[in-house]
Image (cartoon, grey):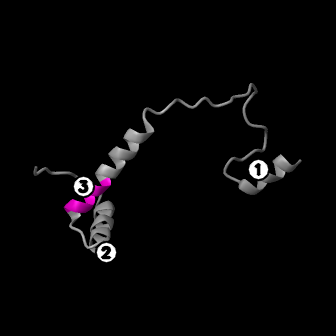
């Protein structure tokens, strides 16, 4: 069956490169990737919700910057 799909330009470029390196057509590469994704999802079954542990509190401690890994490590070591 013939159809039209829209792909991100970079994804299409990468897919064309992968198809060429694998000696496949772009169509074949897309078919294989889609079958693999659907098969993997079928094998996993429905995903179970993840329950995250939460703790009561007033939020972040003063001076904590979640974007500063070094300071977070220093705080955790204390």
Q: In the current view of this chain or complex, which residue is farthest to the front?
A: 43
Q: Position of residue 5 (x, y in %)?
A: 20, 51
3D distance between C-alphas at marks 1 and 2: 44 Å
- Closer to the chain start, of discs 1 and 2, is 2
Q: Which mark is residue 27?
A: none
- Please give the name of the residue rendered at 83% of the width and 48% of the height, measured from the top-left corner: 75
The residue wearing badge 1 is: 72
Q: In the current view of this chain or complex, which residue is farthest to the top?
A: 56
Whether residue 56 sits left or right of residue 49 in the image: it is right
Magenta residue check for 32:
yes
Q: Position of residue 35 (x, y in %)?
A: 29, 50
Q: Does residue 3 sit above or below 24 in this rendering?
A: above
Q: How many marks?
A: 3
Q: In the current view of this chain or complex, which residue is farthest to the left?
A: 2
Q: Residues within 10 Å of mark 3 (few under 14, many from 20)?
A: few
Q: Are marks 1 and 2 in contact (CB under 8 Å)?
A: no
- Please give the name of the residue rendered at 71% of the width and 47% of the height, measured from the top-left corner: 65
Q: Please tell me in which quadrant of the rendered image residue 70 appears.
A: bottom right
Q: Does residue 5 sit above or below 24 in this rendering?
A: above
Camera-nearest label, 1 or 2: 2
Q: Does residue 26 sit above or below 76 in this rendering?
A: below
The residue wearing badge 2 is: 21
Q: Position of residue 74 (x, y in %)?
A: 83, 53
State the residue in front, 1 or 39.
39
The residue wearing badge 3 is: 31
- Closer to the chain start, of discs 2 and 3, is 2
- Closer to the chain start, of discs 3 and 1, is 3
């Amino acid at each position: 069956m013939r159809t039209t799909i829209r792909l991100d330009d970079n994804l299409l470029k990468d897919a064309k490169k992968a198809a060429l390196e694998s000696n496949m057509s772009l169509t074949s590469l897309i078919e294989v990737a889609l079958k693999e994704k659907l098969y993997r999802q079928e094998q996993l079954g429905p995903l179970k919700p993840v329950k995250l542990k939460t703790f009561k509190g007033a939020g972040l401690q003063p001076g904590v910057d979640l974007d500063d890994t070094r300071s977070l490590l220093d705080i955790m070591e204390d």
